[in-house]
Amino acid sequence: GENVEQHPSTLSVQEGDSAVIKCTYSDSASNYFPWYKQELGKRPQLIIDIRSNVGEKKDQRIAVTLNKTAKHFSLHITETQPEDSAVYFCAASRSNFGNEKLTFGTGTRLTIIP
Amino acid sequence: EPEVTQTPSHQVTQMGQEVILRCVPISNHLYFYWYRQILGQKVEFLVSFYNNEISEKSEIFDDQFSVERPDGSNFTLKIRSTKLEDSAMYFCASREGTVGGPQHFGDGTRLSIL
């Protein structure tokens, strides 16, 4: 089955700096890669996703890049703000098989230092 | 914006007792999921449900677990005889019927087994 590795497990950045979180996946049939933000005790919230027919996607301060050949994808947050502090999870799935279960990475605890 | 709702938010149960966790998916969604997150760990897939039947289940989802959609709005997860290791946050998620549609998560039920 699919295995998703995520690094780093913790990340601290100064407010205003950029943060990058990286994930690798094992199943070459995976073609949908969402990123979720989870604040303490709350639900995972989808912040951005990318499909395998696209190499990069951007939404304001957040961008995701995908390298299908290397089987890795990354989340980039620019101009970080205190409210970006949370745990971020990457995930992967096969989006044309109906079920489309998500396999999650182990999470990155991002702390923005004011 | 429509949301997935889950009840109760916190359930405390004695080991060996049965517990039912309840979810109301977003109304026009067709695919339903249960995930589990042990404290401090990643989110893990348990089961997916479509067209009134299980479409996939993980190895965690053994004979003690069952799911049901008793009416047009509720989706339940039952654990027949709870164990200490069932203590976790349980998330329900749903998505539309389109291929590759994002999964939306509920706020979760924190299950504590004593």
Image (cartoon, helix red, strand yellow):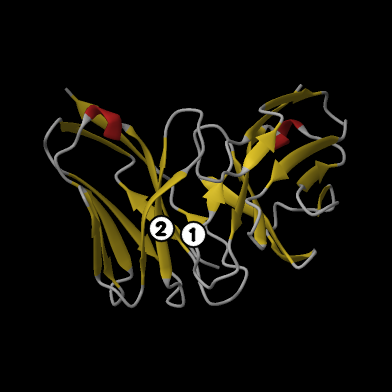
Residue B113 screen position, x and y as percent: 75, 26
Residue at 28 percent of width and 72 percent of height: A70
Quarter of the image with the C terminus of chain B is: top right
Can you identify the residue that label 2 sits on? A34
Q: Is residue A75 left or right of residue B66?
A: left
Which chain is indicated by disc 2?
A
Can you identify the residue that label 1 sits on? B102
- Please tell me how many numbered marks the rendered image carries: 2
Whole-number angstrom distance, CA of label 1 to CA of label 2 = 8 Å
Secondary structure type for disc 2: strand
Would you identify the image quadrant in which residue A108 lies?
A: top left
Contact between marks 1 and 2 (CB within 8 A): the answer is yes
Residue B53 screen position, x and y as percent: 79, 65
Would you identify the image quadrant in which residue B23 lies?
A: top right
User: Which residue is nearer to you in this view: B100 or B91?
Assistant: B100
Which chain is indicated by disc 1?
B
